[in-house]
């Protein structure tokens, strides 16, 4: 499978043109293009251009409102509620993260509860954006069923990613972003496209058999939670936080309402921001830096997000699957 070279500017312009020509206004097109470009820049390829055709499917079907704007309401001094009005989640986040940061800095802690938006991106952009303002952040969202609870062979949970970010003064935040599935479905789909095997324990075939073939998982099979019952418990937590707690759907309810156009379904997201300045009785930054140094001294240990931040320093071209680029060009 051949790749072609695209500069970061070319990736941005290709994505922007594609979104603009498929029902997005200029603001939404710019936000989405920036998100796609940054995912490619940082090496998060399963959330970069790879996602564009699915976004376009949702826009073409009318499920996603490419010109929609979220309704952001401050409910209490520490609670923000957002109705996404069926627009794309990055647009919701662009409008609501500054309000979350403001309340968390003022009150020590704040919660952002998002409903009725379409999330298909990585989650590190929102937690990292919060942490860049000196706040710790946690976020999670559900999806349509793709993951079997521990002990089952049929899906109930979404891939249900979680992300956590810890701020560092004068350094990039420490950020992890992970599916509670053994592997994100986007990574399984990339492995299928490129002909790679996946580790045993990633998922099951449609008959409930273990497999290393990503196609057998992606096409009618099911993902497994990471860590068995432990990952299953965390996936359940995400269902509750991003569903019942914020007033949106569980994954199985999302599936019942979705039009199955291939685009991201409507759903909820939970984001928590906490101020170390308000809570800590010590120099929290120096204290946590000593902890990270201790981690790094124990062997070949890489802090979460380090690879992404290293990739970010490379301003050169990225090498993108040629068939994918041609498909996106045909959509634009």
Image (cartoon, rainbow, N blue to C red):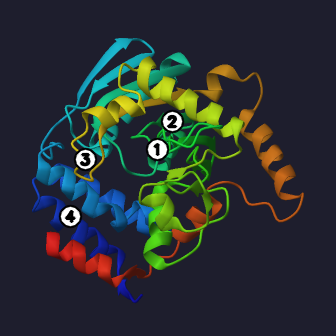
Label 1: which secondary element: helix
Decide: few, some or many residues near mark 1? Use Cα within 10 Å; few <14, some 14-19, many ≥20. Answer: many
Question: Which one is closest to the eye, mark 4 or mark 3?
Answer: 3
Viewer-closest of 234 and 121? 234
Q: Which residue is mark 1?
A: 129
Q: How many marks?
A: 4
Label 3: which secondary element: loop
Question: Which one is closest to the eye, mark 1 or mark 2?
Answer: 2
* For residue 318, side relative to residue 224 (left or right): left
First in sequence: mark 1 or mark 2? 1
The answer for how far apart the CA atoms under marks 3 and 1 are is 31 Å
Decide: few, some or many residues near mark 4? Use Cα within 10 Å; few <14, some 14-19, many ≥20. Answer: many
The tag on residue 139 is: 2
First in sequence: mark 3 or mark 1? 1
Q: Quadrant of the N terminus?
A: bottom left
Q: Which residue is mark 3?
A: 260
The answer for how far apart the CA atoms under marks 4 and 3 are is 24 Å
């Amino acid at each position: 499978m051949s790749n072609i070279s695209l500069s970061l500017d070319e990736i941005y312009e290709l994505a922007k043109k594609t979104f603009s020509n498929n029902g997005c206004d200029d603001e939404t097109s710019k936000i989405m293009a920036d998100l796609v470009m940054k995912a490619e820049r940082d090496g998060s390829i399963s959330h970069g251009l790879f996602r564009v055709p699915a976004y376009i499917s949702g826009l073409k079907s009318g499920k996603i409102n490419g010109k929609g704007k979220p309704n952001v309401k401050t409910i209490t001094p520490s609670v923000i509620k957002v109705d996404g009005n069926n627009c794309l989640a990055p647009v919701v986040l662009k409008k609501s993260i500054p309000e979350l940061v403001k309340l968390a800095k003022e009150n020590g802690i704040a919660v952002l509860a998002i409903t009725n938006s379409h999330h298909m991106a990585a989650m590190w952009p929102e937690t990292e954006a919060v942490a860049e303002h000196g706040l710790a952040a946690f976020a999670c969202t559900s999806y349509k069923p793709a993951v079997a609870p521990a002990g089952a062979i049929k899906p109930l949970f979404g891939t249900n990613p979680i992300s956590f970010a810890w701020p560092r003064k004068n350094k990039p935040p420490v950020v992890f972003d992970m599916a509670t599935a053994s592997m994100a479905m986007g990574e399984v789909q990339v492995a299928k496209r490129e002909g790679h095997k996946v580790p045993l324990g990633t998922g099951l075939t449609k008959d409930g058999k273990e497999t290393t073939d990503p196609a057998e998982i992606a096409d009618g099979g099911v993902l497994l939670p990471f860590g068995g019952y432990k990952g299953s418990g965390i996936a359940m937590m995400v269902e509750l936080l991003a569903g019942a707690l914020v007033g949106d759907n569980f994954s199985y309810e999302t599936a019942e309402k979705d039009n199955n156009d291939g685009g991201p379904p409507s759903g909820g997201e939970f984001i928590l921001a906490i101020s170390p300045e308000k809570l800590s009785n010590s120099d929290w930054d120096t204290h946590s830096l000593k902890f990270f140094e201790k981690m790094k001294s124990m062997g070949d240990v890489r802090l979460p997000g380090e690879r992404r931040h290293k990739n970010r320093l490379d301003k050169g071209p990225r090498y993108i699957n040629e068939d994918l680029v041609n498909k996106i060009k045909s959509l634009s």
